[in-house]
Amino acid sequence: MAGRKMFGGLMKQAQELQEKMAKMQEEAAKKTHEATSGGGMVTVVVNGRQEVLSIKIDPEVVNPDDIDMLQDLIIAAVNEGIKKTQASMADEMKGMTGGMNIPGLFGG
């Protein structure tokens, strides 16, 4: 009988954690993170869902003869923005799980 009670308690804790995670993800989706590359020549804003919300490109970096450099700067800024959102989610998850490392959760 004690095992059944313990199992029920674990299930309740798991459900509460799942609810907290859903709320945290909802809140994180509202947060934005800004990232730049090329010394500020390209700036992107990414939300917690890892969606790019905006890209600003300094006109000085636009060179029709060097499109590859501009593309590389955009990729670098977007990747940095995504890393920032992942790091933010990982930090929030650590706080929620008491620092437990749960494999598969935001790089855990």
Image: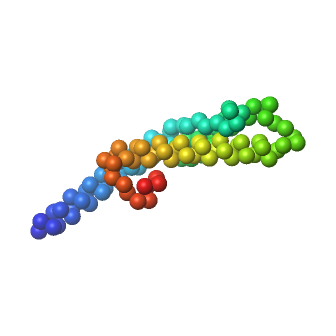
Image quarter where the C terminus lies is: bottom left
- Is residue 54 in view from this perspective? no
Snapshot quadrant of residue 46:
top right
Q: How is the image coloured?
A: rainbow
Figure quadrant of residue 73: top right
Residue 34: horizontal and vertical position, in percent?
59, 35
At 31% from the left edge and 47% from the top edge, which residue is drawn? 98
Residue in view at x 33 percent, y 48 percent: 99
Residue 105, position as x, y percentages in the image: 43, 55
Residue at the outermost front position: 39
Q: Is residue 44 in sight in this rendering? A: yes
Q: Nearer the viewer, residue 52 or 106?
A: 106
**Quadrant location, the N terminus:** bottom left
**Residue 17 vs residue 60: left or right?**
left
- State the image quarter where residue 70 is shown: top right
Where residue 10 sits in the image (x, y, percent)?
24, 59
For the point 64% across and 36% down, which residue is it?
Answer: 36
Single out the residue that lies furthest toward the left: 1
**Residue at the image point whose x is 25% and y is 56% from the top:** 12
Count of numbered badges drawn on the protein: 0
